[in-house]
Image (cartoon, grey):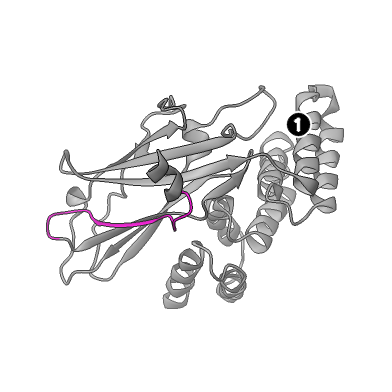
């Protein structure tokens, strides 16, 4: 256990070969070792073909994940499978691809039916990553993280969100939207801001059928919080609604710069190179 606790302080990066030829390198990374209650927790996977030959999609194995808490209990997953299968595309030499695994969605708990974010209780957690190739396990690697109670403004934001969402009723939806916007505007630097914008985007696009307003929240999410995992999910639709290639290029350059030092920087860099090549 002492070894596991010490591992919390280590940089959470794993690099391992995925197939026997060791030409596809996969890096599994957590953005940090400590998260606030309700904050998104994602494993960022980077796949790179470091060889000189194309790697066929059938040789790229599945990834599965197990999460254990500090008492040794294995968390029951919320969805199946508890991992993902790589894309059904061959990997050209030098080609890289990126995936985010949302641990909150797969292993978190929800305190009530109105809360829009799955979360982990405070404590230490240990992740085991299993990598397969052609239905055979070839790698097993480990990551770890800690969840703590928020304090200060972050605690205030979380309390406001819990109060708002737990007391929300259908007839009060307009006030609900306004309250979410008010919380976001009052605490724009909160770690919960990407979640609020994600919720607002869905509300306006799906519930209110106001796609223009929904896209404006998605654009703000990617532009102001490009380091977040939610930004990656919204990037495609945001670029789709931009009318010109130059607009997309300028936007990608901006978010790439704003994401400097984060795991998402490589995602924007790749998207920018792809857009420039069109």
Quadrant showing the N terminus = top left
Q: How many marks?
A: 1
Residue at position x 85%, y 51% in the image: 186
Please tell me which residue lies in front, 188 or 251.
188
Residue at position x 44%, y 56% in the image: 10
Residue at position x 70%, y 26% in the image: 114
Image coordinates for residue 44, horizontal then vertical, percent: 43, 53
Is residue 100 among the parts visible in the rendering? no
The answer to if 205 sits in the magenta stretch is: no
Image coordinates for residue 262, horizontal then vertical, percent: 53, 64
Q: Is residue 119 above or below residue 182?
A: above
Q: Is residue 45 above or below residue 74?
A: below
Is disc 1 placed on a helix, strand or loop?
Answer: helix
Is residue 180 among the parts visible in the rendering? yes
Write the start and end of the magenta stretch as one range.
8-21
Q: Residues within 10 Å of mark 1 (few under 14, many from 20)?
A: some
Please name the predominant secondary structure of the magenta segment in the image.
Answer: loop
Report the side of 146 relative to 59 (left or right). Answer: right
Question: Which residue in the protein does label 1 denote?
Answer: 162
Q: Is residue 114 above or below residue 228?
A: above
Q: Is residue 221 above or below residue 206?
A: below
Report the side of 233 relative to 76 (left or right). Answer: right
């Amino acid at each position: 256990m002492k070894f596991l606790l010490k591992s919390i302080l280590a940089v959470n990066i794993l690099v391992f070969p995925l197939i026997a030829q060791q030409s596809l390198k996969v890096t599994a990374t957590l953005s940090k070792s400590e998260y606030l209650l309700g904050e998104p927790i994602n494993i960022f996977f980077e796949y790179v073909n470091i060889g000189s030959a194309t790697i066929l999609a059938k040789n790229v194995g599945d990834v599965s994940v197990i999460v254990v808490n500090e008492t040794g209990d294995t968390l029951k997953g919320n969805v199946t499978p508890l991992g993902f299968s790589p894309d059904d595309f061959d990997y050209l030499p030098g080609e890289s691809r990126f995936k985010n695994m949302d641990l909150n969605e797969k292993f978190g708990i929800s305190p009530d039916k109105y809360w829009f974010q799955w979360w982990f209780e405070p404590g230490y957690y240990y992740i085991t990553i299993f990598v397969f190739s052609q239905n055979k396990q070839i790698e097993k690697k480990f990551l770890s993280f800690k969840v703590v109670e928020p304090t200060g403004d972050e605690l205030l934001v979380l309390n406001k969100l819990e109060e708002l969402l737990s007391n929300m009723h259908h007839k009060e939806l307009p006030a609900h939207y306004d309250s979410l916007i008010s919380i976001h505007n009052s605490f724009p630097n909160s770690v919960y801001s990407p979640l609020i914008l994600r919720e607002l985007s869905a509300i306006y696009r799906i519930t209110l059928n106001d796609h223009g307003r929904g896209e404006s929240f998605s654009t703000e999410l990617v532009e102001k919080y490009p380091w977040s995992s939610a930004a990656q999910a919204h990037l495609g639709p945001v670029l789709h609604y931009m009318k010109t290639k130059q607009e997309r290029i300028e936007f990608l350059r901006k978010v790439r710069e704003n994401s400097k030092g984060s795991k998402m920087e490589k995602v924007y860099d790749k998207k920018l190179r792809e857009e420039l090549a069109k």
